[in-house]
Image (cartoon, grey):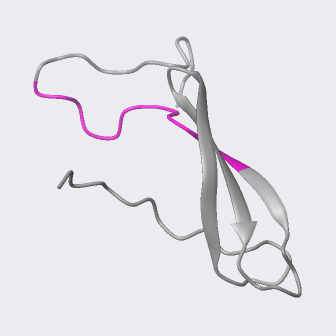
Amino acid sequence: MKNRRREPAQPCPLCQGKTRVTGARKPAASIIERYYVCMDADCNHHFKTLTSVVGTVVPAKNGNNLDLFEGSDD
């Protein structure tokens, strides 16, 4: 059986109830868009989130690091 990594739970932004992922797409190399539905039958809210990579926290051992905001002084 394939070991699937689970993303952190994203509560419903309206009722704070449990949700499940109904789909996902990758519009760019560093962005993931996920689609959710609230499991609360009284709410049933459908929404989407964006997860993006904004930079490197600890440099990679192989030297391949992200500098998404070149020229920034941060």
Which residue lies at the image location 43% right of the left edge and 18% below the top edge? Answer: 67
Q: Is residue 15 left or right of residue 26?
A: right
Q: Is residue 69 magenta?
A: no
Residue 62 x, y percent position in the rendering: 11, 19
The residue lying toward the viewer, choosing from 1 and 47, is 1
Which residue lies at the image location 51% right of the left edge and 19% below the top edge? Answer: 68
Residue 20 x, y percent position in the rendering: 61, 67
The residue lying toward the viewer, choosing from 46 and 67, is 46
**Magenta stretch mostly in which secondary structure?**
loop
Magenta segment, which residues? Answer: 49-61
Which residue lies at the image location 79% right of the left edge and 72% below the top edge? Answer: 13
Residue 54 x, y percent position in the rendering: 52, 33
The residue lying toward the viewer, choosing from 44 and 63, is 44
Q: Is residue 45 left or right of residue 3?
A: right
Quick check: 30 above or below 22?
above
Quick check: 30 above or below 51?
above
Residue 28 x, y percent position in the rendering: 58, 20
Name the quadrant containing residue 39.
bottom right
